[in-house]
Image (cartoon, rainbow, N blue to C red):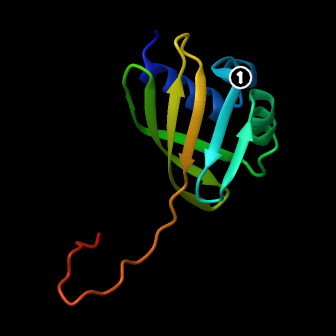
Amino acid sequence: MADTADLARNYLSHLTNREWDAWSALLHPDVIYTTPQSRERRRGREAFLRFNQEYPGDWQLTEKWVLGDTDRAVIWFAWTVGDDCGDAQSFLSFDDSGRITEITEFWPEPYDDPDRATPATERF
């Protein structure tokens, strides 16, 4: 199988550059895309393609780091849409032919940790 970290980099690059044919070729026809925070799931390459093509705004994704093993990869990336920006993580699973079968994506929202009698957290 191909290097999953390289496949993940290609996935992010093709997505942010809207290279839809190259991006779609990386996906298994029955790929499942899940965003746990919103409890949403998209099933199938065509549904996931449409979701990304129709996503509003001039969004950009920038790789921070990628880690891969034999059949999985994780991408930490920065995103921008207009004046909004943040970080997100994609967890990718691959089949034996190197196509992405599952994507679980987290778009964390910042929050302030509650005050404690004894501080357990360093703020930055």
Q: Residue 34 at what x, y percent from top left?
A: 63, 45
Q: How many marks?
A: 1
Amino acid type, residue under disc 1 in the picture: Ser
Above-or-below relation of 19 to 104: above
Q: Residue 25 at what x, y percent from top left?
A: 68, 17
| Residue sitting farthest toward the left | 118
x 56%, y 49%: residue: 79
The residue closer to the viewer here, 95 or 19, is: 95
Q: Residue 105 at what x, y percent from top left?
A: 56, 46
x 21%, y 90%: residue: 117
Callout 1: helix, strand or loop? helix
x 54%, y 18%: residue: 95
Q: Is residue 48 visible?
A: yes
Q: Is residue 17 visible?
A: no
**What is the crowding at mark 1: few (fewer than 14 residues within 10 Å), some, or many (at least 20)?**
some
Above-or-below relation of 1 to 50: above
Asked if residue 14 lies left or right of residue 93, the reply is: right
Q: Residue 37 at what x, y percent from top left?
A: 59, 59
The residue closer to the viewer here, 75 or 62, is: 75
Q: Which residue is mark 1?
A: 24
x 29%, y 69%: residue: 124
Q: Quadrant of residue 52?
A: top right
The residue closer to the viewer here, 60 or 101, is: 101
Above-or-below relation of 80 to 90: below
Asked if residue 122 lies left or right of residue 29, the reply is: left
